[in-house]
Amino acid sequence: MRWTTSHLQDLLVRLAEAYPDAHCALAHGDPFQLVVATILSAQCTDVRVNLVTPALFAKYPTPAKLAQAKILELETLIHSTGFFRNKARNLIGLGQALLERHSGTVPSDPQSLSALPGVGQKTANVVLSNAFGISALAVDTHIFRVARRLELSAGNTPGKVEADLCRLFPRDTWIALHHQLIWHGRRVCDARKPRCEECPLRDLCPTGTGRIEDPHSGKRMRKTRTVFPGA
């Protein structure tokens, strides 16, 4: 399907109307806390991370404290987030790198931020947009799924999907769009059982209307006639 400028604008309007309060679900008070929380969120729900971080931040409130953490104590605190050994090593490395390279301050430069231990492009984009208000569009599992179902991208990696979305949508929409697509993926466009009947985007969605097979499951939804507004 070819998305026109008017169809893309319609999509943005519908998402904004459906999710006017969409925001970052990771509880944080500053850029340092957000970096830590985002690292912990890998292969883990935001709800679980938010249960873990209060005690974590109380014990390690600064990069200096985190850099000096004892690995076993840190692993115990974050155990329930999964992959806790690797995450603990990354968090200690993060604290050390922030002290050694950035005087204990989280950098707002994308290249410097993504070079920190445990911080790749996705985490860097989350921090840039939510902590610094810098336009960036992180692609998580929800956005990856929704974008492919909508045929906004045929990319087979988060990086390719991110590039397609950034090419389609104006830069000043990226931050809001990131949150709205995540909320849509969690609340309506579920991985296993998408609620297409409730979807405010259904007539725009080639997967929801059954025109194409679901790129996520390989199954085809019940086919309905697609009518684009103004078409």
Image (tube, helix red, strand yellow):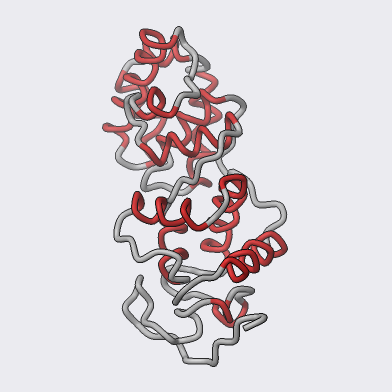
Q: Quadrant of the image for the N terminus?
A: bottom left
Residue drawn at point x = 61 percent, y = 45 percent: 172
Residue drawn at point x = 38 percent, y = 43 percent: 42
- Image x and y of residue 140, in percent: 43, 51
Q: Which of 164/157 is in front? A: 164
Q: Quadrant of the image for the C terminus?
A: bottom right
Residue drawn at point x = 45 percent, y = 87 percent: 210
93 vs 35: above or below: above
Residue drawn at point x = 41 percent, y = 47 percent: 44
Image side of residue 96 versus residue 47, left or right? left
3 vs 176: above or below: below
Q: Which of 101/165 is in front? A: 165
Count of marks, rendered view: 0
- Image x and y of residue 112, in percent: 39, 22
Image side of residue 50 versus residue 116, left or right? right
Q: Which of 42/133 is in front? A: 133
- Image x and y of residue 177, in percent: 58, 53
- Image x and y of residue 220, in percent: 38, 85
